[in-house]
Amino acid sequence: MGHKIRSLTYPQLVVLGYLVIITMGTVLLSFPMATRSNVSVGFVDALFTATSATCVTGLVVYDTFTHWSLFGQIVIMTLIQIGGLGFMAVITMFSFFLRRRIGLKERGLLRESVNSMYLGGVVLLIKRLLIGTFLFEGFGAVILSARFVPQMGLTTGIYNGIFHSVSAFNNAGFDLMGKYGKYSSLISYAGDPVVTLTIMGLIIVGGIGFFVWDDILKHRHRFKEYQLHTKIVFAITSFLITWGAIVFFLFERTNLLNGLPFGEKILVSLFSAVTPRTAGFSVVDMGVSLPGTRLLIMILMFIGGSPGSTAGGIKTTTFAALVISAWSSLKNTKGDSVFGRQLEESALRRANTVVVINLTLVLVSSLVISATKPVLPLGDVVFETVSALSTVGLSTGITGSLGIIGQLMLILLMYTGRVGSISLALLFMQHRMPVSIQKPTEKIIIG
């Protein structure tokens, strides 16, 4: 058994590691003590919740506050933390405490787990990742607790501050605001700048990627010295938040935003542009949003956050690679370049692969769910599948109506979105020998 595990490739070990965590979470959430009613939820619902928490998604079949006990909520928060950091980072944290040496095999796993570009320095990157995570989460928890304590009392307020800080930083979207109405998320705090800006800040910092943190730490404010990856992440992230907020405001100014003070309209628009990438919190009811707004949200969800972060989606760098390649093709220039650097050809191939696989998964899963639940609007089904695959957690309210087959489809999508569609595909392609014979070249018509 040990020999078989040692022979597994890095992607296979990452995929297996998340599966083990989800299994453990499912067992714990199946205990009667995990619910307020002291009655077990059953295997499928426990599996769905454990997968959603571990894959930092936020889709739920039960309201987190009203259904799960304190024990169940702590299990969910622990799964969120492990899933957001990556299971190898958590294992490494204990190795640091035990002063155990990190071997070459483990370094390779760490590199795969956090999407680092380099093997050298990966242990130092993990140390900074762990320290940064707990600092940001702690800072967020203090601010949120200061806001919640006057309303909820000392113990409950601090607990809520910690829970929502962990959930926001890890882009999970789980909340304990069911006390103000089931599945209400942060709607009751839509006009509260302290809560919304803190949550937004945590989402953005958690979603830009650990590699970007390291680059910023090394070069501080010297943007020209940043690596190309960091520059692209900053550029695309800024563009998507700005563009998303403006379009959301224009679409919903006479609908969801109607009657709100102008300052609150801006705040809600910004929050609604940040949270689809890929946090899942909501300050408005997406179930009554306009079709154009849902399309906007789906685009933002599909793109998601950045590599090596707590976010999902195809990632900002993938989107950038496709846009840069298309622009170069339209200009008929050789090579795809940006910020004075040329992209590797392999980066574009990988970007194309990610988009094709993810689009295929969305379409196939939407067809399956629509076939099993034909009464559900197709737009809501597609929205749900994009949300699951991109590990977002936003919903139009149909999650609990999907049935067992629909829930199993979402479980598969959430799992794929967290471990990565390419990593999962490599399970079936890793051991195939490359073909050395060059086939004849022939032209085809494109477009």
Image (cartoon, rainbow, N blue to C red):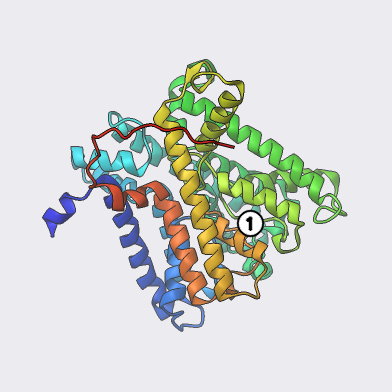
- Mark 1 Cα within 10 Å, few/some/many (few <14, many 20+)? many
**Residue 211 against residue 377 in the figure, above or below:** above
Q: Taking 343 as reference, is 384 left or right?
A: right
The answer to which of 62 and 33 lies nearer the viewer is: 62
Tell me if residue 41 can be seen: yes
Point out residue 99 in the picture as x, y percentages from the top left corner: 20, 41
Q: For the point 50% across and 34% down, which residue is it?
A: 317
The answer to which of 93 and 271 lies nearer the viewer is: 271
**Residue 326 against residue 409 in the figure, above or below:** above
**Where's the N terminus, which quadrant?**
bottom left
Q: Taking 366 as reference, is 211 left or right?
A: left
Q: For the point 58% across and 64% down, which residue is it?
A: 176
The answer to which of 386 and 357 lies nearer the viewer is: 357
Residue type at mark 1?
Answer: Phe
**Where's the C terminus, which quadrant?**
top right
Point out residue 367 in the picture as x, y percentages from the top left corner: 55, 65
Q: How many marks?
A: 1
The answer to which of 297 and 319 lies nearer the viewer is: 319
Q: For the point 36% across and 51% down, which residue is it?
A: 425
Quadrant in which residue 133 is drawn = top left
**Residue 370 against residue 167 in the figure, above or below:** below
- According to the picture, the residue beneath numbered tag 1 turns out to be 148
Q: Taking 286 as reference, is 32 left or right?
A: left
Tell me if residue 76 can be seen: no
Point out residue 31 in the picture as x, y percentages from the top left corner: 39, 77
Dot 1 lies on which element?
A: helix
Q: Taking 211 as reference, is 296 left or right?
A: right
Point out residue 351 in the picture as x, y percentages from the top left corner: 47, 38
